Amino acid sequence: MPSRRRLLSGLAAVGAAGLAGCAGGGSRGTNFSPGRESNTEWPLPGHGPRARSYVPDAVAPRTPPTERWRAETGPAVGRVVVADGTVFVPAEDGLHALRLRDGDERWHVPIRPYGVAVADGVAYASSRSEPLVYAFEADTGEMRWRVETSGDFAAAPLPAPAADAVIVGDTDGRVASLAPRTGEPRWTFEAFTGVYSLAARDDRIYVGTTGGEAYELHVVETEAGDHRGVPLWRRKLPGTVRALTAAPGSVYAATFGGGIARLATGAAAGRTEWHAPDAPTVTDALVHAGGLVAGAGSEGVSAFGAADGTRRWRVAVDRVAPVSPAVAAGDTLYAGVGGALRAYALGGGVGVGPYRADVERWRRELPVRTLAIGDGALVVASDDLDGSSGVVVLE
């Protein structure tokens, strides 16, 4: 049954954006169904440790949405997340916790955050101007611990799926595994350049750096019962690794100016399985949904076959403006491109080959910094809410 929020309607959609052709065509991996769960959350910047930025079962607006609420905050400096009925906003004036139901502020701490992630009732935040990692009680904002590192951060903390740990990587290239309850370092690894992106699957940690390197670390247990991160391989890529997405047997890497690559993991030691060098530069997130890998950049939104890297569809925009990371739920992809929030058919609309129609489902003129999905709604950080920065929730 659809959520009641999906029955609400608002602004009329504007005409569809121009389409460009794609190689490969076909319907493989493009048959998506609308979401059915209206109580989903988005607790990490990429939704989960794998950083897929996609929730197959989540309900989100497929038709022009209405506004649930809006609240002022400082400009967002990292991706918003949604957990425990709360929207967490890393902003220039601190970390805000807003009630998802009505936007009331639950708490605010005046740190200088870069990113935030929530797991097991704790909000972990990294700092963009100080070498600090924080842990706060998610319901009260009470500080649980604070740990100093060697550098500041360009990636949010990553609660790891194995070994009960929080992974952080700083701009000096130091990757550290921290104990969630105390912040005590358990193991460290030194990359050659600063850490820009993180993802994880089971007992593997994937690290992307500003120098264009991707690493796979294997978390193993020692004879003493401790854990450590053992590097399995390092792969040089043609640009800063802006986004990583972990999948069974492979990891997808989006680079600045160097396209998107699929790298084999484990015993294959980072071998390039395919490389799409002409893929547009993606803004800090890849959407991995079934047989597609998609992302948003200044040129618009593009989707590629996850298995072979062929372009499946592309929607171009004719206005250069700040771009938000893309997110997806059910059969719809969302991104802020060309100065507007846009919703696209994840499978590429109607048609085959280069001829597609009805790719864009709706748009709303709204500059977007970051997006998240939760409770059947889109949570949008914007710099233009009646002339102020803040968050608006659309359903």
Image (tube, helix red, strand yellow):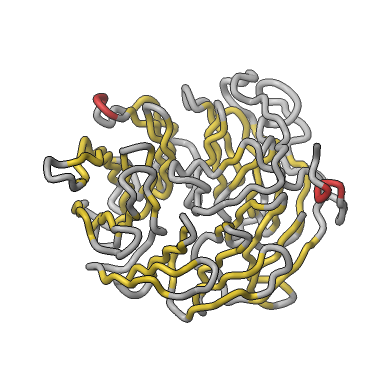
Q: Position of residue 64 (x, y in %)?
A: 82, 50
Q: Residue at x 81, y 51 (%)?
A: 5
Q: How many numbered marks appear?
A: 0
When asked about the image quadrant of residue 34, the answer is top right
User: Which image quarter holds the C terminus?
Assistant: bottom right
Q: Position of residue 370 (x, y in %)?
A: 58, 59
User: In the picture provided, is 336 more to the left or to the right than 163?
Assistant: right
Q: Is residue 181 above or below residue 39?
A: below
When asked about the image quadrant of residue 193, the answer is bottom left
Q: Position of residue 226 (x, y in %)?
A: 18, 48
User: In the picture provided, is 273 more to the left or to the right than 85?
Assistant: left
User: In the picture provided, is 311 more to the left or to the right than 364?
Assistant: left
User: In the picture provided, is 204 more to the left or to the right than 117?
Assistant: left
Q: Is residue 246 above or below residue 46?
A: above
Q: Position of residue 349 (x, y in %)?
A: 73, 31
User: Which image quarter holds the N terminus?
Assistant: top right
Q: Residue at x 65, y 67 (%)?
A: 99
Q: Residue at x 41, y 74 (%)?
A: 143
Question: In front here: 237 or 207?
Answer: 207
Question: In front here: 296 or 109?
Answer: 109
When asked about the image quadrant of residue 76, the answer is bottom right
Q: Residue at x 40, y 40 (%)?
A: 253
